[in-house]
Image (cartoon, rainbow, N blue to C red):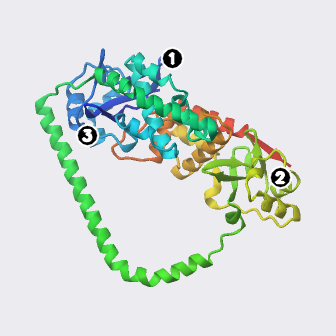
């Protein structure tokens, strides 16, 4: 199986530079990973025009033998522009680590550390590994906010932030030392520079036109908006929240190859909590059976019992008045996704996949299981395919077939999830 070659931007002391990264791929029974470079040098360029000029004219480098390389010299300059999800500000890491460890901060830092580890592996930067191994927090960033909660979590984050403040310059210096900006063919560079300039001009025109349209829409709609404001506010005030909205707990429906299941989930301080305990989710094949289970066993071995509003749910279940209705966006369809993934990104429904990923991530976070985060990291073939489907970008290279490994990886995640379900009768 061949993995994709991805344009990335690295924010380094010498500036923002563009290069190519080939995430791990398997060939002839061996696993590989590489960056654009040669021998001890990591090639990087000031912009996509220089990168395009290089890949169109130079054939001797470490990616030349990559299974998908033949596609790269044919790409346009816009197609070689790194997207936002592959832009890594290494210089800004100390500032990032000084923030509170919320979802966005940890997510961005996790992405940067992933690419830094890859650089250290490929370029054999032992000093970088030494820094990343000196604080336990580096190894759990992919798990999200969970490891950094509570007293021990605060200490973990503090140690990580202090290590970055004291030693991050060592990482930057080591990477900076192997970065080399090659000269490119001037004639080709003139062509690619014109391509980039034309694309940027077209993008600016499109953005200006969109801004103008938005401004006109605002003027036209202003009076109508003022007239409708009071009516909308009245409608919002009159709209019933419903019992489940009041208690902050969601009934959810899960559809697998084995059948349909119902359970409950809520978020407490942005952390998911399911009906169940110790990583096992209590589910039922009908809402009636689920309500009966809550009435009989809702207070025992149940993490939701810790939620302040749980007693209201338990009381309604006990007196027989609990009605369990599932909203559309709380219905998760896992059935059929593995086959779709095996057929490639075009066969996958992004809405279905997005919801399925949400469910797998939530249950893994709740169970303190990092396997989902690891499998869906963009450095993994499945993670790259999922990212491609959920965050489409016309300048991004599509994952290349076959997709057997991605289907198998997804199947393993779903099997692990299904193993967490305990069916109540």
Residue 106: percent from left, percent from top: 50, 40
Mark 3 Cα within 10 Å, few/some/many (few <14, many 20+)? some
Q: Position of residue 234 (x, y in %)?
A: 56, 81
- What count of labels does the image hold? 3
Report the residue marked by disc 2: 298
Q: Check the image and report above or below for 416 versus 327.
A: above
The label shown at residue 76 is: 3
**Labelled disc at residue 29:** 1
Label 2, residues with CA under 10 Å away: few <14, some 14-19, many ≥20: many
Q: 310 or 289, which is in the foreground?
A: 310
Around disc 1, counting alpha carbons within 10 Å, would you say few (fewer than 14), some (14 to 19), or many (20 or more)?
few
Q: Nearer the viewer, residue 52 or 126?
A: 126
Mark 1–mark 2 Cα distance, whole angstroms, equals 50 Å
> Which x, y percent locates residue 32?
44, 20
> Element under label 2?
loop
Examine the image and state in which quarter residue 407 appears: top right
Which quadrant of the figure has residue 80? top left
Q: Which mark is residue 216?
A: none
- Residue shown at 22%/49% (left/top)? 200
Horizontal side, residue 218 vs residue 235: left or right: left
> Disc 3 on helix, strand or loop?
loop
Question: Closer to the N terminus: mark 1 or mark 3?
Answer: 1
Q: Where is residue 70 drawn, in percent x and y? A: 31, 28
- Please report the residue visible at 59 percent of the width from the left and 47 percent of the height from the top: 358
Q: Is residue 112 visible?
A: yes
Q: Nearer the viewer, residue 415 or 304?
A: 304
Label 1 secondary element: loop
């Amino acid at each position: 199986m061949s993995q994709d070659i991805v344009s990335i931007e690295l924010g380094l002391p010498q500036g923002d530079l563009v290069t190519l990264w080939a995430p791990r791929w398997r060939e002839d029974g061996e696993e590989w990973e590489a960056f654009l470079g040669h021998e001890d040098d990591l090639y990087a360029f000031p912009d996509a025009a220089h990168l395009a000029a290089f890949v169109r004219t130079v054939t001797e480098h470490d990616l030349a033998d990559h299974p998908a390389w033949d596609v790269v010299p044919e790409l346009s300059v816009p197609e070689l522009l790194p997207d936002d999800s592959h832009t890594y500000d290494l210089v800004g890491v100390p500032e990032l680590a000084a923030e509170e460890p919320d979802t966005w901060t940890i997510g961005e830092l996790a992405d940067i550390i992933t690419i830094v580890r890859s650089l250290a592996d490929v370029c054999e930067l032992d000093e970088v590994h030494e820094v990343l191994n000196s604080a336990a927090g580096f190894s759990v960033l992919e798990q999200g906010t969970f490891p950094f909660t509570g007293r021990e979590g605060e200490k973990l984050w503090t140690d990580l932030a202090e290590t970055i403040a004291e030693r991050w310059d060592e990482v930057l210096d080591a990477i900076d030392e192997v970065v080399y900006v090659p000269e490119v063919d001037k004639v080709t560079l003139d062509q690619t520079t014109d391509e980039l300039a034309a694309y940027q001009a077209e993008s600016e025109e499109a953005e200006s036109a969109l801004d103008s349209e938005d401004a006109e829409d605002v003027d036209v709609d202003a009076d109508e908006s003022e007239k409708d404001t009071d009516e909308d506010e009245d409608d919002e005030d009159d709209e019933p929240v419903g019992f489940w909205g009041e208690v902050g707990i969601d009934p959810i429906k899960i559809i697998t190859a084995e059948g349909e299941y119902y359970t409950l989930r809520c978020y407490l301080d942005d952390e998911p909590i399911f009906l169940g305990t110790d990583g096992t989710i209590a589910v039922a094949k009908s809402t009636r059976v689920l309500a009966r289970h809550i009435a009989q066993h809702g207070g025992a071995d149940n993490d939701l019992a810790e939620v302040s509003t749980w007693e209201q749910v338990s009381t309604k279940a006990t007196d027989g008045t609990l009605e369990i209705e599932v909203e559309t966006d709380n219905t998760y369809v896992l059935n059929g996704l593995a086959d779709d993934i095996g057929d490639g990104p075009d066969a996958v429904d992004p809405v279905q996949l997005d919801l399925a990923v949400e469910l797998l991530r939530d249950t893994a976070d709740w169970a303190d299981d990092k396997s989902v985060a690891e499998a869906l990291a963009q450095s993994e073939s499945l993670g790259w395919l999922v990212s491609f489907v959920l965050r489409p970008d016309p300048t991004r290279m599509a994952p290349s077939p076959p997709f057997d490994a991605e289907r198998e990886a997804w199947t393993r995640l779903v099997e692990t999830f299904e193993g967490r379900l305990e069916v109540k009768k």
